[in-house]
Image (cartoon, rainbow, N blue to C red):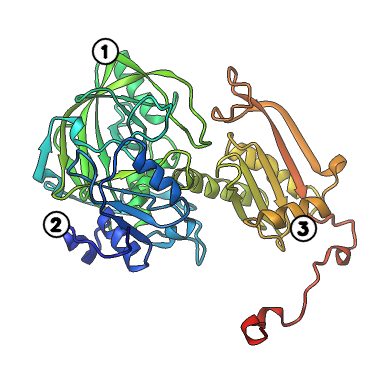
Amino acid sequence: MENRKTTYTDNNDKNTKEPSLRQFLSILQDNNELLIIDKKVSKKFQLAAIVGKLDKKEAVLFTNIEDSKFKVVSNILGTRNRFFYGFKTNGGSSKIDFSNFANINKESYPIKISSDAPFYKNNSNDLFDLPIITHFEKDAGPFITSSIVYVKDEESKSQNSSTHRMLLLNNKEMAIRMVEGRHLHKCFSYAKEHKEDLKITVVIGVHPALNLAAAYQAAYGIDEISIANYLLNGNLELAKNQFSNLNIPKHSEIVLEGRILYDKYSEEWMVEMLRTYDHKRKQPVFEINKIWYRDDPLYYDILPGYTEHRLLMGLPIESKIFWYVKNTVPTTKSVHLTDGGSNWLNAVIQIKKRLEGEPKNAILTAFSAHPSLKTAIVVDDDINPEDPTQVEYAISTRAQADKDILIITNVKGSSLDPSSDQNNLLTTKLGIDATISLLKDKERFEIAKIPGIENIDLDNFI
């Protein structure tokens, strides 16, 4: 294992404004955040175990995958800091700027569409050619975990993209997990009502802004590609997929075209965000028509239940909660989905408190913005919401259990939480106002400081 440069067959990506996975990897290399493993690695458990050991550390590129000519990359967004690289962020912070998403449209952010693309150079009809990874001991089998599914909505006539896990069944078919009521499931239900298979195009290995946008729960009818283009400052390029007539990222590493069969299902399950196993479900079967891929292709794998998975899902929600709460409490400074809550279940909200009651308004708004949220804690602006010790300190010294704790029973919660009522998807939610009461003497809560401590260099004294 070493941190070094690698050579791609088509290395022009790093010298162009056109965003791609290769361009992003070059940025990681330049920042010494990409490890390269040349030793042979097995697709079953071994690769996942290595990536698990690298959690919250460097991204990793595997160049020698057993029984595969594809390279595998993982953990590319395994830290919050990497969201600085090539994304539009909120001035100086790693918070992705989702604030303008509701106003994004294709006219404001025009995208160039090409008839050709690098992935059209090679093709296959066999899913066994792909280095699909088996991650955990009780998973149903090997899963594609980074796939972005593109589909045309026949009702709204808009294009949609979303992230879906896909279980390898045989060399032609996969089971695809669709959450009921979400956009792809709506498109599938419409096709099924008409006894038609649903044409889709699946991409693996793109600039991570596309993965992030696909994970965002955009309003119905909004094209997530426009969101990705916004995050990439208008530099995204697309290519037409002739099979589905859909526009997909031009610099995709791997493209799968095919149909979701309206009358065929298969059981699937795997590890989810909380690193617990999901329910066993019958899910529709995806049948491939053809696989396209670039020269020297890169396969992107996301390790389920680890930091990269959680950040990709959680950061868009973190931003969504922030803007919802800020509309209710304008002095909201920050929202942080905690690591202990898997960047999904627990939020810390930082405000500059002006009125009693504002923290409870913030709590209720956060629960409305993200129904899966289980715990919301509100702190003052002198408390770092990303520091669990400071947050616990605020709860310990600024909250009273009989006045500042809000418990809401029998409300919709996360389907992932094993402690909830799984049959009815009901849970109990906890809100904590850990801010200083405006009725108290604020000086009693002042955190003492030692003058000049920030200038002390212990090496000068030891």
Question: Which labelled disc corresponds to residue 285?
Answer: none
* Residue 242 pos. (x, y %): 13, 36
- Identify the residue shown where x is 28% and y is 16%: 262
* Label at residue 195: 1
Please state if 423 lies on the left or on the right of 78 as rendered. right
- Looking at the rendered structure, the secondary structure element under dot 2 is loop
| Secondary element at image label 1 | loop
Image check: 452 left or right of 174?
Answer: right
Visible residue check, residue 223? no
Q: Nearer the viewer, residue 419 or 67?
A: 67
- Considering only vertical position in the picture, is 307 above or below 180? below
Identify residue for label 3.
354
Q: Of the residues under marks 2 and 1, which one precedes in the sequence?
A: 2
> Do residues under tags 3 and 2 come within 8 Å of each other at their CB atoms?
no
How far from the left and from the top, in percent, is residue 307? 48, 47
Residue 187 visible in rendering: yes
Q: Amino acid at mark 1?
A: Lys
Discs 3, 1 touching: Cβ within 8 Å: no
- Residue type marked 2: Thr
402 to the left or right of 151: right
Marks 3 and 2, how far apart at CA:
58 Å
Which quadrant, please, contains the C terminus? bottom right
| Amino acid at the residue labelled 3 | Arg
First of labels 3, 1 by sequence position: 1
Q: Earlier in the sequence, mark 3 or mark 2?
A: 2
Q: Which mark is residue 9?
A: 2
Mark 1 surroundings: few (<14), some (14-19) or many (≥20) residues within 10 A: few
Other residues around mark 2 within 10 Å, as few (<14) / some (14–19) / many (≥20): few
Q: Quadrant of residue 22?
A: bottom left
Q: Between residue 400 and residue 99, name the one nearer to us.
A: 400
* Residue 352 percent across, percent down from the top left: 71, 59
